[in-house]
Image: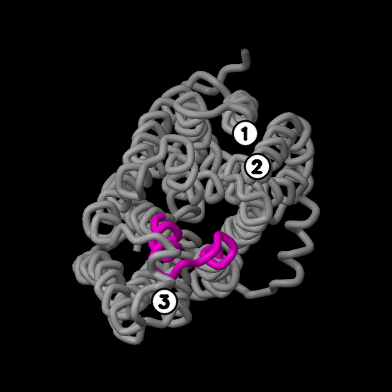
Amino acid sequence: MESANKEVSLFRSGSVLPFVLITSLFFVWGLANNMTDTLLAAFKRIMSMSDFQTSWIQIAFYGAYFCLALPAAILIKRYTYKTGILVGLGLFILGSLLFYPASLTMSYGFFLLALYILAGGLSILETAANPYIIALGPEESGTRRLNLAQSFNPIGSISGVLLSKVFILSQLKQLSAEERATMDPDKLAAVQLDELEAVMAPYVGVALCMVVLWILVKVTKMPKASDTDSRLDLLPTFRRLAKRPHYVWAVVAQFFYVGAQIGVWSFSIRYVMQELKLNEEAASNYYIYSLVLFMVCRFVFTALMKYILPRTLLLVTAAAAITLTLVVIYGSGLVGVYALIGISGCMSLMFPTIYGMGLESLGDDTKIGGAGLIMAILGGAVLTSVQGYFSDLTQEISVAFYVPLACFMVVALYALGAGRFESARQRAKDDDTTKTPVYSILQNS
C-alpha cells in the first residue's frame, strides 16, 4: 500500500492559535446541519407532511449553500478570510433569530426563509474556513490538516442532535397524521403552536451563543492571506479551473457525496422508526450513535493519513459504504440499522478528503475553487428531494437508499481515477508559472 510523506509538518510557525479558533467554526456548522436534519421528522409530524414536502427543508438549506458560495468567494478575495467569517456568522445569527417570528406565524414558508438565511451564513463560513485551514501550513499536509479540523465538526453534529432530541423531538405530541386530521382546528392550531415554539427555542439560544463567537473572532488577530493577484477576473479563473481535471472531478464527486451524506442522515430516523417500530425521540438515539462513529473515525482516518495516501483511504471507505448501503436496502431490523450506522464511519473521511484533493495546487484560484466545492453541497438538496420522491412513491424508506448507493459509486470512481488526476495536476502545475503554493500566500498582518 502506498504511504504518505511522514516528514511534512502539519502547521506553519505561529498558525496553531488561528487554527484552533477557525476550527471552532467547524463545530458551528456541524451543530446547525444536524439540527436541520431532525427538522424533517419534526415537521412531518407537526404539519402531517409527506417526505417530499419535508425535503424542501433540505432544498432551502443546501440551496443557500449553492447560491452564496460564489459571492462569498468574491468577498474574501476582495477583502479577507476574516471578513468572510464575520459576515457568515452574522447571517447565521440573523437566520436563527428569525425562527422566533416564524414560530409565531406558524408558517412553513417563513421557517424555510429563516433556514435559507441561516444556511447562507454557513455557506460563507465554509467557503472562508476550509481553504484558510489548508493555507495554514504546507500544501502537502493540507488534506490531513483539513481532516483534523473537520474532526471537530461531528462534535457539533452530536450536540445538534442532542439539542434537537431534548428540546424539539421530546416536545412533540405523539399524535398521528390521522388523529391530527380529525382534531378540532383550534385545538390542532394550539398543539402546533406549542410544537413550533419547541422548534424555535434551541435556534434562538444558539444564535445568542454565536454572538459571543462573533465578538471573539472580531477582536482576534489572525494571519492574513493575500493573493499574489487580487483582481476579480472570474471568467479567466473559471477557464483555468475547467482545465484542472482533478478539480472538476472533485466538484462532481463532492456533489454526489454530499447528496449521499444528507440522504443517509435525513432518512436515518425514519428508517430506524420503520425497522424497529420506535418513535422519533427513541429513534434519534441511533442517529447519535452514527454521529459518534463518524467523529471517532474522522480522528482515526486523520491519523492514518500520515501513513496512507488520502486517495487510497477514500477508495476503501467508498467501497465499504457501497456494501453497507446494500445491507440497508436488502436487510431488515437491527442488521439494517447497524449497517446504516456503519455508513457514517465510512463517510467521515469523504468531504474533507475530496475538498483537500480538489484544491491542491490551485494557487491564486484557491478561493474561487473553494467556492465551487462548497456550491457542490447543492447535491444535498437535489438528491435528498429525489430520495424523498422515491420514498413517497414506494412507501418504503429502504428503497430510497438506492440514491445514496449510486452516489457512493461516483465517489469510488473518483477515488479510482485520483492517481491519473494527480499526474495531470502535476503537469499543469509544471506548465503554469503564474501560480504559487497555497501556503505561501500567508503573511502576518
Q: Residue at x 57, y 17 (%)?
A: 3
The amino acid marked with disc number 2 is Val
Left or right of 361? Residue 278 is left
Name the residue beneath numbered marker 1.
329
Q: Secondary structure at mark 1?
A: helix
Residue 223 image point, x, y percent: 36, 58
CB within 8 Å, label 2 to label 1: yes
The amino acid marked with disc number 3 is Phe
- Earlier in the chain: of badge 3 and badge 2, it is 3
Residue 417 image point, x, y percent: 76, 33
- Earlier in the chain: of badge 2 and badge 1, it is 1
- Name the chief secondary structure element in magenta: helix
**Foreground tag (3 vs 2):** 2
Name the residue beneath numbered marker 2.
399
The amino acid marked with disc number 1 is Ile
Q: How far apart are the alpha carbons under marks 2 and 1?
A: 6 Å
Q: Secondary structure at mark 3?
A: helix
Name the residue beneath numbered marker 3.
111
**Foreground tag (1 vs 3):** 1
Residue 347 image point, x, y percent: 52, 36
Q: Secondary structure at mark 2?
A: helix
Residue numbers of the magenta segment: 38-55
- Earlier in the chain: of badge 1 and badge 3, it is 3
Q: Quadrant of residue 402?
A: top right
Residue 159 image point, x, y percent: 27, 49
User: Considering the image in quadrants, where does the C terminus appear?
Assistant: bottom left
* Residue 116 against residue 274 in the figure, above or below: below
Q: Residue at x 73, y 29 (%)?
A: 416
Neighbor class of circle 1 (other Cα within 10 Å; few <14, some 14-19, many 20+) is some
Neighbor class of circle 2 (other Cα within 10 Å; few <14, some 14-19, many 20+) is some
Q: Quadrant of residue 209?
A: bottom left
